[in-house]
Image (tube, grey):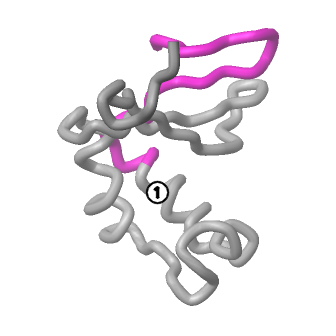
Amino acid sequence: MYYLYKINNIVVRKMEDCKDEYNLLAKWLSTPEVLEFYEGRNNPFDLDKVVKKFGPRARGENLVTPCIIEYDEQAVGYIQYYEIDPEEYDVKE
């Protein structure tokens, strides 16, 4: 497996386009503790909603790259990134 970042027992890897990864996100995105900071408490994600939103990202069809954070080989979080077009922000030299 390709790791974007690895130090000691912490790993950041690209999210895979598979049912296990979607189920993991659906579990996380339906808990009140996560929803308080993402989409709101009254907007949980079921599996279909996760696949619709994160599937294109996981397949590389979207500019956003989704990643899973692991600690001791256990998935513990999600992070994403995307490349910013330098013309979209003010660069001071």
Residue 7 quadrant: top right
Find residue 5 and report its horizontal and vertical position in percent: 61, 14
Amino acid type of disc 1? Asn
- Name the residue that disc number 1 marks: 23
Observer-nearest residue: 10 or 40? 40
Q: Is residue 14 above or below residue 39?
A: above
Q: Is residue 49 above or below residue 25?
A: below
Q: Is residue 90 left or right of residue 76?
A: left
Residue visible at 34% across and 52% down in the picture:
54
Observer-nearest residue: 64 or 33? 64
Residue 66 in magenta? no
Find residue 2 and report its horizontal and vertical position in percent: 46, 11
Residue visible at 64% across and 33% down in the picture:
69
Find residue 65 and report its horizontal and vertical position in percent: 39, 34
**Residue at the farthest left position:** 61
> What are the residue bounds of the magenta stretch?
1-21
Residue at disc 1, secondary structure: helix
Observer-nearest residue: 79 or 52? 79
